[in-house]
Every structure is written in structure tokens, then in C-alpha cells.
Amino acid sequence: MAASLRLTGSLVPDGPARFDPRRDLRAVVDLLRLGFGRDLAPQDLRWLDGLSRISGASLTLQSMANGLPGAGEATGQVYYHDGQLVGNVSAFRCGRDVWVVANVVTHPAWRGQGIASRLMRLAIQDLGRRGAHQLQLQVRADNLAAQKVYASLGFWRMNSAVALRLPAHSLGRRTFQTLGAGQLLRPFHRRRDRRAVQALLDRAGELDRGGPTSQLVQALDMGVMEGLDDWMSGRRRRTMVVDSSTGPLAIGTLLNQGRIGPHRLEMAADPDWTGRVEGALLDGLLSLVATVPAQDIEAEVDARAGGPLASLLWAGFRRSRTLDRLALDL
């Protein structure tokens, strides 16, 4: 693997450098495979396969943002030693002045030498010059070495999220939760529901949860161009709300990613109603699975959201990992 990380062209000086996709992309892809190993999900591997095939004069780091929800402008840093790429940090704009840091990885043979810290400091300086007011990232709760690096740089924990997965060909176990009088499950209507659902997501902590824009927040702003992009990419989004006379109590969305997979499911409930409506919402969302290609379904919920988490576990979703969402204010 080390040979695949070495440049075949001119030698790059030892130390950090700004990411150059024409020079670095293939080596970065190999480094990500090596560095993250078993943590890479099937869709991550397909994304890396696609990146490794990208070439041409128009290639930019923006290619790496494809498939990342809410990702916009992109930049990155790499680190070379004796002509071999041994470190990488990427960052994507996700909001007016918020950037998400991703792909922080060091070659296993060069870990413990401060490479990740040095690249992160350079990335922080660069993003500050670009107008970033806050940097965010996700890291496994059990990755103590990475947690130590981020703490030394001043990152603080926003919250934690539990990632879950329902295996393909499983329709999940129904909760059979019954809604109360005056409550109903219906499709989300963006024009009619947008303001009330935005207030719901604010109360549920979805608007400031950190990381890339959630599918639930994206549903608020889905327009013709976004719908066209989904259609051209083979995706379809279905969003449902639990409604009442006082407004929506919960919202959930199922992103059908066709044969590429996996599908993604997200839910959020009003804190005053959590535990009483998510089951019915989940039953409705899972009823849509029979009409989409069989793929694993991924879900991610706030670790404090007991209602959605309990419903997903009851339905057969399995915990895959717990992620801490960290932030650095500039």
C-alpha cells in the first residue's frame, strides 16, 4: 500500500502542502482506504472508487464533496514524507460561515508524530482567512487519540449522535404505535409546513446539531433544482409529519438512493412529545421501504433523543457507532 501512496512524477518537498487534486487525489484515496479501514461503509468505498477514476484538467477538490449532504466550497491540506503522501485533512463549507472538517487521516506508520495536529492547525488558519466563524467535525467517541488532538486545538463537544443500520431485505419490526385523537400521519408539504416544521426542528436541536446539513433540514429548502439533482442522481426523498391541531409533532424523511444505497432515514420529534409519536412515524417511513431497491438503511439520531432511538432499536436497527460532534469557534 505504501508504494501506491508515492508520487510517480516530480518529488514534493517534505512537509505540509495545499491539496492539489491533479497531484494528490489518487494517493489521498489510497490513504483514506488504509487509514480508515473497517470504518469505511460500502457507500464510502464506492465513493472512493469514483474518486479514483476522476481525471482531467477540470478536476478540483470539489469532486470530493459530491455525495456529502449540504457540502459546498471545499479545500484541503496534505503532508508528504520522502515523496510519500502520509497525511490529509479536507474541509467543506456547510453554511455561510461554518465549515465541516473531514478525512483527518495519517498513515499508520507515521502516527504519533504530530502530523494530524500540524495539518489541523494549518487548516484552521486557512479557514479563518476564508471567513469561517466555526469549524465542526465528527469523531468516534472511542477514538481517544483523535479526541486528545482535537481537545488540544480547542474543540469542544456539541453533542453526540448514534449511528444505526437496518440490514437489506429487512422491512423492520412495526411498533404499531397508535396516534392520539386529532393526530395523523401525512406527507410533508413544503410551502404549507415549512415555518412550523422549522420551529419543530429548532426545538428538537436539529438546526444547530453540527456536521453536514441533515436530511430533515434539507427538506425545508427542497426546490425544483434540488429535485432535479435528485432525479438525475437516482435519488428520491419522501418526508412525512405527525400533525395535530396545534402543528407538527414529529417529522421523518427517507432518502431512497436507488441501487447505489444505502438508504438514509432521519426522524425528529418535539421534546414535549418524544416517545409518543415516533413509532407511528417510523412505521409509516418503513412502509415505503417495500417500494425501493433492497439496500441497508442508515439512521443517525442525537444520543439524547430517547424516543427516536428506542423506536429504531425496536424496529431492528443495530447500533454501529457513537460519534461526538465537536466545534471550534474562531
Image: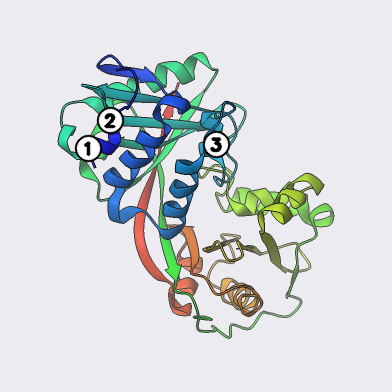
Residue 291 visible, this orientation: yes
Front tag of 3 and 1:
1
Asked if the residue under mark 1 is in contact with the one under mark 2, i.e. CB atoms within 8 Å, the reply is yes
Q: CA distance from mark 2 to mark 3?
A: 21 Å
Q: Please report the residue visible at 53 percent of the width from the left and 43 percent of the height from the top.
A: 212
Secondary structure, mark 3, is: helix
Q: What residue is shown with label 2?
A: 6
Q: Is residue 236 above or below residue 58?
A: below
Front tag of 2 and 3:
2
Q: Please report the residue visible at 57 percent of the width from the left and 54 percent of the height from the top.
A: 204
Q: What residue is shown with label 3?
A: 63
The disc labelled 3 sits on which kind of residue? Ser
Picture quarter with the C terminus: top left
Residue 274 spot, x, y in % from top left? 55, 66
Residue 211 visible, this orientation: no
Q: Foreground residue, 261 or 185?
A: 261
Which label's residue is closer to the chain start, 2 or 3? 2
Question: Disc number at residue 128?
Answer: none
Q: Is residue 272 left or right of residue 14?
A: right
Q: Residues within 10 Å of mark 1 (few under 14, many from 20)?
A: some
Secondary structure, mark 1, is: loop
The disc labelled 2 sits on which kind of residue? Arg
Picture quarter with the N terminus: top left
The disc labelled 1 sits on which kind of residue? Ala
Give the residue furthest to the front.
8
Q: Foreground residue, 219 or 112?
A: 112
Q: Please report the residue visible at 69 percent of the width from the left and 49 percent of the height from the top.
A: 198
Q: What residue is shown with label 1?
A: 2
Q: CA distance from mark 3 to mark 1?
A: 24 Å
Residue 158 spot, x, y in % from top left? 42, 41
